[in-house]
Amino acid sequence: MKNLRKSWMGIPIATLAVCLMNQAVVIAESSAISEVPSSTSAVPESMIGNQSVLEVQPENASPISDRIIPLSSFTAASPSDAEPQTLTNAEVVIDQVTSVSQLSDVQPTDWTFQALQSLVERYGCIAGYPDGTFRGNRAATRYELAAALNACLDQVSDRFASKEDLATVKALQEEFRAELSTLKGRVDGLEARTKTLEAQQFSTTTKLSGLVWFNLTGAFADRSVLAERPLSRNVNVAPPRGPNGVPQRVSYSDPNVTFSYYAWLTFNTSFTGKDSLVTQLAVGNASSPANAFVSSGYFNSWGTPITDQTGTPTANTFTLRELFYSFPATKDVQIIVGARINTYRYFDNNRFTNFLTGAGSFNSSGSTLFSAVDRGAGAVITWKPTKQIRLAAAYLAESTEFLNPAVPNFNTAAKNLFGGNSTLVGQVDFSPTKSVNLRFLYARTLLQANGAGLIGGAVGEPLPYGFADDGFGGGLNNAIANTFIANFDWLVTKGFGLFGRYSYGTTKIAPTTAGRTGGSVDVQSIQAGVAFPDLIKKGALGTISLVMPQDYLGGRRFLRSGNGDGATQYEVEASYYYPISDNIAVVPAFYAIINPNGFGDNPTVFVGNLRTQFKF
């Protein structure tokens, strides 16, 4: 018996009160009521180990049917409370309380306050000591539990479970039988659908998101446009030089209007909740009409929204665009490693020239001189030592989905991580206020000469887009390009902002032909613009951007294409991002290209683009 009695020792009475509260609620809501005697000399059956024992109150025990169960500070019993305390005769005398506020040692912050409040004020089955305390930390015996449970059962039975109540409930069940049946069917259907979703869910750790663009694009000029380009119309093959050393020139008329699509599917997987494995697929079928006018190496360079492209070597075929894993090294340091990391995620950003919501052409969304490696294999490290400062550094070897891997100097990461086209980038961001962001970037890019010994084309942004040779049609050794960029955005007022970007790049030229002098191609680019956040509608953004994508300061003689007759090309770009909903936006854009391809006699080319952007 002693061992059985100790099975309840160490349980604070406050904890027992919570159990009583739960039991009272269950019985009050039950449709079947068991008769409970008003007093008892035995406690309910309990399991000790594998035996069922009925413990009977000793004959010489003092009456405890009125013994209180004090609930007060609601904290676990201390070691000193491990043994039941012996109560004096004075303490056995109890006073019924009608409000929990009568118990001086019970506070609203106590963890079982609500349970005690209901037992006292709703059910009236809890009393206190004559001194106005409840002593909730004192351990309870099995006898005390039985008495307290019996008192609460009496109250619940008398108040909430009469035969008339049961008859009323039964009548209501009959009256609303059809509605209850319909509700049960709906619940069963929801349970079945939930089980189906759980069984067929894609993944508990991976989230799928997508972006889809539809582009309606046209380009036109009032007469034919001169370009440096071979007759094959392949804009990424350098034109031959004529007898006088001038690159071959051809003229082109207005292309057809096009309607195209471009889409990304992104799988974001997290294993810890803080890390992210990103896998992105791309597919498209566009060749923007503006490309019909450009010189070799300028493909997708001007008058072309980033979203108006094929994005793969073969149209309508999915390809891997991004694949990387990011994780926090410390609270302020993030590390990104992968086989295909996109530089735009981490470098040369601008709140008004993000192609998803702002100025969205290839020339406006980022520096035209940044780097030949748009995406690559390697690593990025970002560090935010303060709220105002962010540092980022990366090494990436070229791995880009739209470059044909069959070409010897394309996608060199899979062939030589450190010997092919690669870039080393560092950037410092400084935000003195929430309205102003300043960015300073340096990129050192290794350019591998292609099979014809030329530098440039799709891997020659620091030129920025054209091809270069030794000035006589001869080949070049691999080259080093250095680029320096300063970039800012300033939200002047709530509905007006300014942005700008200045870039300077220099590419070393080293001829393979003995006796020929090398040098460098030096070029600068400038961008300035105004922005109108929340124009007409919250979340909208209007931008007007003036861009000088390349202004050659020296080394023009090395340019096989991209020089024209020495005129400087300018672009005026206007776009308006209008969100119809959280998932759909319409973006009209208009571009005017002045002195296209560097020819001062060329007519201005106008490009119009209307795109609809869907995200899910």
Image (cartoon, rainbow, N blue to C red):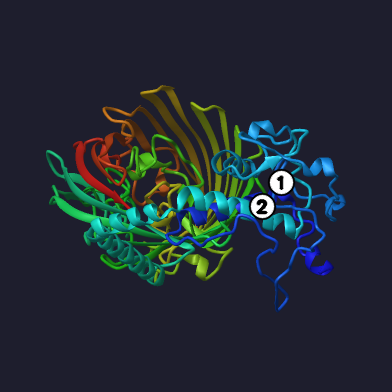
Circle 1: is it few (<14), some (14-19), or many (20+) Cα within 10 Å? Answer: many
Q: Position of residue 262 (x, y in %)?
A: 28, 56
Identify the mark nearer the N-term, 1 or 2.
1
Quadrant location, the N terminus: bottom right
Residue 461 or residue 68, whichever sits in front? 68
Q: Position of residue 322 (x, y in %)?
A: 44, 60
Amino acid type indicated by mark 2: Ala
557 sits to left or right of 423? left
Circle 2: is it few (<14), some (14-19), or many (20+) Cα within 10 Å? Answer: many
Q: Position of residue 188 (x, y in %)?
A: 32, 66
Which residue sits furthest front?
59
Q: Which residue is mark 1?
A: 68
Q: Is 589 drawn above or below residue 214 in the view shown?
A: above
Disc number placed over residue 381 in the picture, else none: none
Cβ atoms at labels 1 and 2 below 8 Å apart: yes
Q: Residue at position x 51%, y 56% from top?
A: 26
- Residue 54 in view in this figure: yes
Q: Is 187 drawn above or below residue 369 in the view shown?
A: below
Q: Position of residue 511 (x, y in %)?
A: 50, 57
Residue 316 image-quadrant placement: bottom left
- Residue 242 in view in this figure: no
Which residue sits furthest top?
493
Amino acid type indicated by mark 1: Ile
Q: Which residue is mark 2?
A: 148
* Residue at disc 1, secondary structure: loop
Residue 293 or residue 473, whichever sits in front? 293
Q: CA distance from mark 1 to mark 2?
A: 7 Å
Q: Residue at position x 59%, y 58% from top?
A: 37
Which residue sits furthest bottom?
50
